[in-house]
Amino acid sequence: MSTEGHQSKVRTRWLIVILLVSTLVRLALAWGYTGFIAGDDVEMLEAGISPVTPLHYSPWDVRNLLLPRLLITPVAWLASRLGSSEPTLLVHLATLPFIGLATLNVSLVFIIAARTLSRRIALLAAGIYAFHWLPLGYGATVYPRTVSATCVLVSFWLLLGDDRDLLRSLGAGALVAFAFAARYSEVIFLAPLALMAWPLGLPSRRGFLRAVGLGGGFVLGASVFIGLVDLWTWGQPFHSLVEFGRYTLVERGSSSLHAHQSFLWYLRRAQFWLIPSLLPFLVVKKRGDRVLTFWLMFSIPILVLSIIHHKEMRYLQGVIPFLAILVAEGVTWFWERAWRKTTVALLLVSALLSLRTALELHREKSLSAVRAALELRDDPEVGAVLLTQAWAYGDHLFLGPHRRVTNFDVAPSPEELEGVIANVDAAAFYEDDVKARPSLRRVLHHAGFEETHVFEVGESRPVVVFRRF
């Protein structure tokens, strides 16, 4: 066997190791830490599970329901057919398609980098991407940007081809439309994909043909994935898109308690998503025109996301594959200059920091609230509950489909609590809210409630449960 053939086999084996280890880590995070991050994951689960279970759920008008119905509903249907309705198991099973796609994304990073740069760089890029905390941590959840990252990567791969420009660009545009349906902000990848023809050195006529095909594929895809899906699920085409535009662009609203961040928010937090020990590899001079395509896919979306008024770390998931490839190219630059100990040390530090951050992301999920919800679910005397942030408890997923839930987005005032406490059998609050507002405890005691349990799991916010006696 030739040296080149031997090296190819070795790299293939290392890629398999990377895929297996990163997948096992995601499975451990998903199944070891049952809780929720910010509520979008609960929305996805309820939208996907409710069609095939007794769960009653009214989705938010701004949500397109294609993704949960496509990925979660079949899993929930199969589980229900096999006689399983246990909520923890349903939630765990629902993550499996997303974990599978997260693993596919690692493979796509390898394929793209191997095609444009080299197999050595591709293996490095796959490893850097697989263990970056954003795809590692969120790839163990049902958050939709794992899926949109798959769409963007396949779109990019299609546009690397040298033949059938129109067909490839139509397919790429349709995939971006699917990502757009998953989360509307993912339209940001349309512009860098359209500009790919420039660094690839394509003639202007071919570049124009690709741009037309990309736009056409996007319009056709959006007509199906949003127009027809909304007609099916909402009874009106493009209903969720119109409502999203009204809520986000007109009202400048956000589902987060902190709806507005500055233009420099992502830059000021670069140490969290960029990881400082990877920065030296990013700033070295990159060789070849094709590297510019990765810079386009990395920089343009970050710029657009910085302009949008609401920002979250998880919105950056689509740019991390291209960051990983750029960093991997920089690693080879260091390696070729015999800075090998430094290179290995920086990569190890980066991996350890990412693993720690991914673990913290899951340890800080609403683990305590879910444990409280499961106890309340098993209590037949609790028919109505009052909660702060019902999503943290899994809402009706864990509390049961027939239990009435009174929800406050933030801790209620004593007057608000007095107005509803007569109609509930149990209440649960974050422990820090109860300590900060002793008047809440007084109102509860006056209404005949006593503290029965404090749940404190992992690094999640502890929860205090009160029951009526």
Image (cartoon, rainbow, N blue to C red):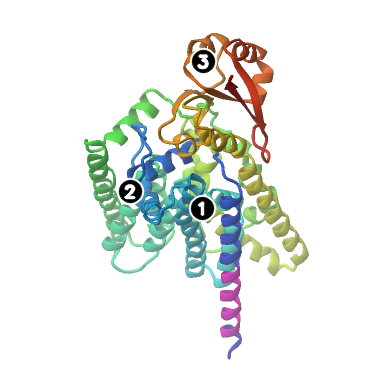
Horizontal side of residue 239 vs 83, given as left or right: left
Residue at x 53% of width, y 10% of height: 418
Question: Mark 3 and mark 2: span between their CA atoms?
Answer: 46 Å
The kind of residue on which mark 3 rests is Ile
Camera-side mark, 2 or 1: 2
Mark 3 neighbour density, 10 Å: few (under 14) some (14–19) many (20 or more)? many
Horizontal side of residue 404 vs 163, given as left or right: right
Percent across and percent down for residue 79 are 41, 54
Sequence-first tag of 2 and 1? 2
Mark 1 neighbour density, 10 Å: few (under 14) some (14–19) many (20 or more)? some
Confirm or deny contact between disc 3 and disc 2 (CB under 8 A): no
Most frequent secondary structure within the magenta stretch: helix
Residue 120 is covered by the magenta coloring = no
Instruction: Specify the quadrant that holds the C terminus.
Output: top right
Answer yes or no: is residue 311 visible: no
Percent across and percent down for residue 221 are 27, 50
Question: Could you say which is closer to the camera, residue 218 or residue 131?
Answer: 131
Determine the residue located farthest toward the bottom in the rendered image.
Answer: 1
Residue numbers of the magenta segment = 5-17
Identify the residue under disc 3: 421
Vertical side of 454 occupied by 80: above or below: below
The kind of residue on which mark 1 rests is Trp
Horizontal side of residue 242 vs 404, given as left or right: left
Answer yes or no: is residue 425 visible: yes
Identify the residue under disc 1: 295
Q: Which mark is residue 177?
A: 2
Confirm or deny contact between disc 3 and disc 1 (CB under 8 A): no
